[in-house]
Amino acid sequence: MADNTTIVTWLMIIGICSLVQTLLTLALMGIVWQRWRKATEAFETFRRDHLGPVLVKIDHAADELEEIIRRLRHADDQVRDVVSGASHAVTELGRHVRHRAWPIFGAISAVRAVASAFAPRKPKLREEADDRNDEARFVYEGGPKYAR
């Protein structure tokens, strides 16, 4: 073996480069850790000073909104109960009236039928019949769009 100095020199260079690289990595990690702590502190300060009071107000508003919704649901249930009761009462009243009063309505219908049977009939005028026929023909032919 001839000369090992070249190999030793290159190993020394690689070792020094590795040591410098490790030291730079550790320094960079220290800087990143320091920046991370500052960012975390800034976020906590922002959360405590600015976001905290807003969140308290939002929580209070949400609680009030839930109370209003609860009251509205209760009122809605009461209205539904009243409407349902009224609907049931009207249905029962209608059934009762139809059951008890149908003879009266039947008698009224019978009197009207008898009256119309004995009533003198009006003769139809020829002009009215012609007008009805003309109107029917006019509608059948397509209305005013096709009128000539």
Image (cartoon, helix red, strand yellow):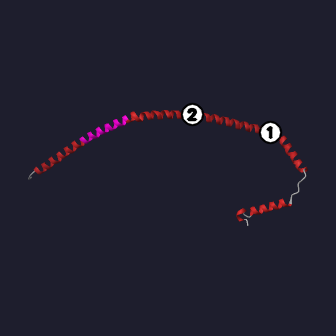
Q: Is residue 70 left or right of residue 48?
A: right
Magenta stretch: give its range.
26-45
**Residue 109 lies within the magenta run:** no
- Residue ID at (35%, 36%): 42
- Three-letter code for the amino acid on which mark 1 is drawn: His
Question: Cβ–Cβ below 8 Å for labels 1 and 2?
Answer: no
Q: Residue 70 carries which label?
A: 2
User: Dominant secondary structure of the magenta stretch?
Assistant: helix
* Residue toward you, 72 or 96: 72
The numbered mark, 1 or 2, whose residue comes first in the sequence reads 2
Number of labels in the image equals 2
Please tell me whether mark 1 or mark 2 is closer to you in this view.
Answer: 2
Residue neighbourhood size for the residue with mark 2, other residues' Cα within 10 Å, grouped as few (<14), some (14–19), many (≥20): few
- Residue ID at (10%, 50%): 5
Q: Is residue 30 left or right of residue 126?
A: left
Say above or below: 27 vs 135.
above
Question: How many angstroms separate mark 1 from mark 2 (CA)?
Answer: 43 Å
Which residue bears the numbered disc 1?
A: 99
**Residue 32 lies within the magenta run:** yes
- What secondary structure is found at the residue carrying circle 1? helix
Q: Where is residue 97 in the image (x, y as percent from the top left)?
A: 79, 38
* Residue toward you, 99 or 73: 73
- Three-letter code for the amino acid on which mark 2 is drawn: Arg
* Residue toward you, 13 or 128: 128
Q: Is residue 86 left or right of residue 44?
A: right
